[in-house]
């Protein structure tokens, strides 16, 4: 019985250490606020779908988003949105429709986390990137979006031809 308690406490601790809130130091906003801000600021959106208990999200937060140059680049170039893909928090879309963050996750097919989306100012998808990513990956994705490469080639084509 004592072994079971220790195992249970260990699992509880492991889950508690992988909360995967948005990374520290980034001005993430809710999706509805982000859509409005993107139009006002004429900036694309960077949408991070995470969830409570996602160890991979926690890993990306601690190993990638900790980079101060990456943080400065993304704050400068994007409206940053964080979506808890399992949350019941309510949002109001520009159309007036009220949905939850979980509904938004379904709408964008965010069935596994982390998932990163780049959207234009109208909310149209530019790129979809699943899974753990490095600082260099995110720099490459930034170039793909900010230099307009997405208008003439897929992300895979861009990444194959990058210097």
Image: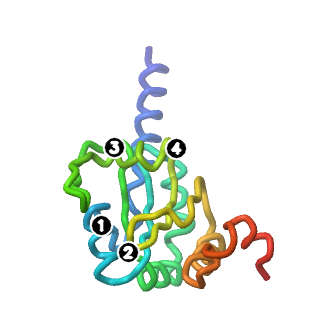
Q: Quadrant of the N terminus?
A: top left
Please name the residue that numbered disc 3 is placed on: 103
* Mark number displayed over residue 79: 2
Q: Find the distance from the CA under tag 3 to the CA under tag 1.
A: 17 Å
CB within 8 Å, label 3 to label 1: no
Residue nearest the viewer, comparing 145 with 97: 97
- Of the residues tagged 3 and 1, which is closer to the observer? 3
Q: So how many labels did they put on this image?
A: 4
Of the residues under marks 3 and 4, which one precedes in the sequence? 3
Is the Cβ of the residue at disc 1 closer than 8 Å to that at disc 2? yes
Dot 1 corresponds to which residue?
29
First in sequence: mark 3 vs mark 1: 1
- Mark 2 or mark 4, earlier in chain: 2
Residue 153 percent coordinates (x, y): 69, 71
How many other residues sit within 10 Å of disc 3, few (<14), some (14-19) or many (≥20)?
Answer: some
Identify the element where label 2 is drawn: strand
Picture layout, residue 52 above or below residue 155: above
Q: CA distance from mark 1 to mark 4?
A: 21 Å
For residue 2, above or below residue 152: above
- Name the residue: 37% across, 83% down: 42
Q: Tell me residue 80's x, y (percent).
A: 38, 71
Identify residue for label 4. 112
Judged left or right of residue 26, residue 143 is right
Q: CA distance from mark 3 to mark 4?
A: 14 Å
Q: Secondary structure at mark 4?
A: loop
Please tell me which residue is depicted at 43% across the width and 75% down the height of the picture.
44
Residue contact between numbered discs 3 and 4, judged by CB atoms under 8 Å: no
- Residue placed at 27% from the left, 46% from the top? 100
SS at circle 3? helix
Instruction: Tell me which numbered mark, 1 or 2, is placed earlier along the sequence.
Output: 1
């Amino acid at each position: 019985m004592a072994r079971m308690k220790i195992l249970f406490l260990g699992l509880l601790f492991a889950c508690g250490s992988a909360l995967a809130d948005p990374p520290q130091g980034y001005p993430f906003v809710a999706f509805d606020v982000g859509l409005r801000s993107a139009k006002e600021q004429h900036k694309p959106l960077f949408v991070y779908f995470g969830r409570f208990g996602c160890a991979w999200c926690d890993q990306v937060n601690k190993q990638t988003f900790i980079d101060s140059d990456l943080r400065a680049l993304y704050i400068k170039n994007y409206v940053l949105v964080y979506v808890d893909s399992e949350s019941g928090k309510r949002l109001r879309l520009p159309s007036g429709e009220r949905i939850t963050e979980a509904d938004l996750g379904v709408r964008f097919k965010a069935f596994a986390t982390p998932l990163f989306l780049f959207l234009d100012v109208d909310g149209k998808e530019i790129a979809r990137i699943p899974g753990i990513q490095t600082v260099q990956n995110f720099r490459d994705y930034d170039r793909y979006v900010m230099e307009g490469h997405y208008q003439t080639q897929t992300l895979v084509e861009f990444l194959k031809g990058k210097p």
